Image: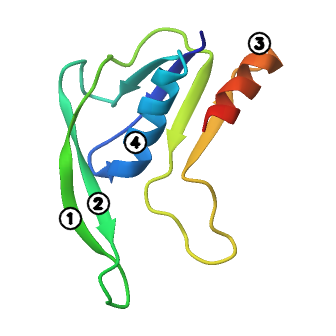
Amino acid sequence: MVKILMLVGDFVEDYELMVPFQALQVAGHGVQAVCPDKRAGEKVRTAIHDFEGDQTYTEKRGHDFALNATFRGHFGTLLQMSGRRRSGPQAGNAARILVDPTQSTQKASLVAATL
């Protein structure tokens, strides 16, 4: 099992938080969602961006996501949520996986393949 630190904050994109969080847990990884200046059990608010026929998206309130850890300790992998994405040919992935170079390549590949 890889121990993963997921950094989140208020109004993180709901889908970009919940899908990797739940998928990595289902794959057997220990995902700890943390937010600077908040403790385990406190909540961050999520946002939902929706295209409804206007020139750009609308932003709606998502739900309250309960943090399951406090920011401290050692982690082998960091999952960084990107928030709002750029559009067009330079658009990147919704999340970046940053791996501690002391961790094995097999563990890093397993986490990357899960997303």
- The structure residue drawn at horizontal position 54% and vertical position 33%, both measured from the top left corner, is 79
Q: Which residue is mark 4?
A: 17
Q: Residues within 10 Å of mark 1 (few under 14, many from 20)?
A: few
Front position among marks 3 and 2? 2
- The structure residue drawn at horizontal position 55% and vertical position 70%, both measured from the top left corner, is 86
Could you tell which of marks 1 and 2 lies nearer the N-terminus?
Answer: 2
Q: Which residue is mark 1?
A: 60
Please tell me in which quadrant of the rendered image residue 50 appears: bottom left
Q: Give the alpha-carbon distance from disc 3 to disc 2, as whole Å.
A: 36 Å
Which one is in front, 37 or 113? Answer: 113
Q: Provide the secondary structure element on which disc 2 rests.
A: strand
Q: Give the alpha-carbon distance from disc 2 to disc 4, as whole Å.
A: 11 Å
Going by the numbered disc 1, the residue's amino acid type is Lys
Could you tell which of marks 3 and 4 lies nearer the N-terminus?
Answer: 4
Q: Give the alpha-carbon distance from disc 3 to disc 4, as whole Å.
A: 26 Å
Q: Measuring from the top left, give residue 78's x and y in whole percent.
A: 57, 28
Q: Which residue is mark 3?
A: 102
Going by the numbered disc 2, the residue's amino acid type is Ile
Q: Give the alpha-carbon distance from disc 1 to disc 3, as whole Å.
A: 40 Å
